[in-house]
Amino acid sequence: MPPALSSTTTGAGPRLVLLHGFTNTARTWGSFADLLTPHYEVLALDLPGHGRSSAIEADLWGSSDLVAHAMGTELALVVGYSMGARVALHLALAHPERISGLVLIGATAGIDDDEARAERRRADEAMAADLRRSGDVRGFLERWLTGPLFAHLPAAVQFLDERCTNTAAGLASSLEQCGTGTQAPLWDRLGELSMPTLLVAGSRDEKFTALGARLAEAIPSGGLVVLEGLGHATHLENPEAMATVIQSFSQSLG
């Protein structure tokens, strides 16, 4: 049997699965998840290397298999954010029969350029090595959250204390096995996706807005929503707007 990912389940209704980003946990979705629970059975997972799944190690394909196992047999709407969006994309390719619809927030299908991808992998591995040496999770997170992706994320919704429940070894493993530099590009496989797919990005997150547009164009049933005035973590910056996007997309699935 594969190791079981830690999870929390709230609400009732059609199943909706939440896959968090790097350094997050199943408990950092905040009021966005609370807004969904009146309408859905929300299954929030701790991905490998994070939260109560910190001791579990897996690459992106392995993570997608573990998510599929945790989901059970019920068809679900899957929402992935950043790293979780990349896991969700792998899940959709490996286990399409589990997914009624796919929402990818701040997503990419990988770095095309071999040299750029290798450079990113070296950077991720160096970051992981520093984290293993220091063991200073809080210091690492404080630096991480000052990066350009999170410039628009208020301190009140950074969930720093919850992020600090992650371990240095778990986060390092995630960087080494699920970092963007480790991901083989999937752009040439996007035509295989048959489920309705929605890409979401904040207008201030120009890099991922462009990537979202490229993904939406390549996925047969893909669409793009750009939320004005928001950055990378749209669901934390404006949970009400993101919940509305999810409900509208869910209704369109019938």
Image (tube, rainbow, N blue to C red):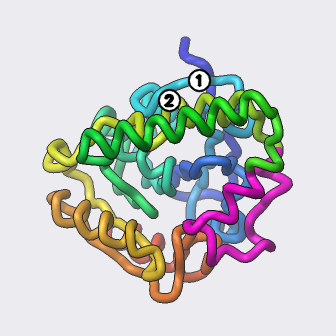
Q: Is residue 180 left or right of residue 199?
A: right
- Which amino acid is tagged 1? Glu
Please rate how many residues cluster around mark 1, counting C-alpha atoms within 10 Å: few if below 14, some from 14 to 19, many from 20: many
Q: Which residues are magenta?
A: 141-164
Which disc, if any, is residue 177?
2
Closer to us: 126 or 214: 126
| Foreground pick, 9 / 112 | 112
Few, some or many residues within 10 Å of mark 2 (<14, 14–19, 20+): many
**What residue lies at 77% left-to-right and 57% top-to-bottom?**
142
Q: Earlier in the sequence, mark 2 or mark 1?
A: 1
Say which element carries label 1. loop
Q: Residue furthest top?
A: 1
Which corner quadrant of the image does residue 182 belong to? top left
Residue 122's place in the image compared with 109, above or below, is above
Q: Is residue 72 visible?
A: no
Q: Is residue 229 visible?
A: yes
Circle 2 SS class: helix
User: Horizontal placement of 236 versus 230: left or right?
Assistant: right
Quarter in which the C terminus is drawn: bottom left
Q: Find residue 126 and report its horizontal and vertical position in percent.
A: 58, 35
Q: Position of residue 214 (x, y in %)?
A: 23, 64
Q: Is residue 147 above or below residue 10?
A: below
User: Is-magenta flag for residue 197?
Assistant: no
**Residue assigned mark 1:** 57
Q: Nearer the viewer, residue 130 or 51?
A: 130
**Does 77 sit left or right of 94 as displayed?**
right
144 in the magenta segment: yes
The answer to whether the residue labelled 2 contacts the one labelled 1, judged by CB atoms less than 8 Å apart, is: yes
Instruction: Report x, y in % for residue 217.
Output: 17, 65
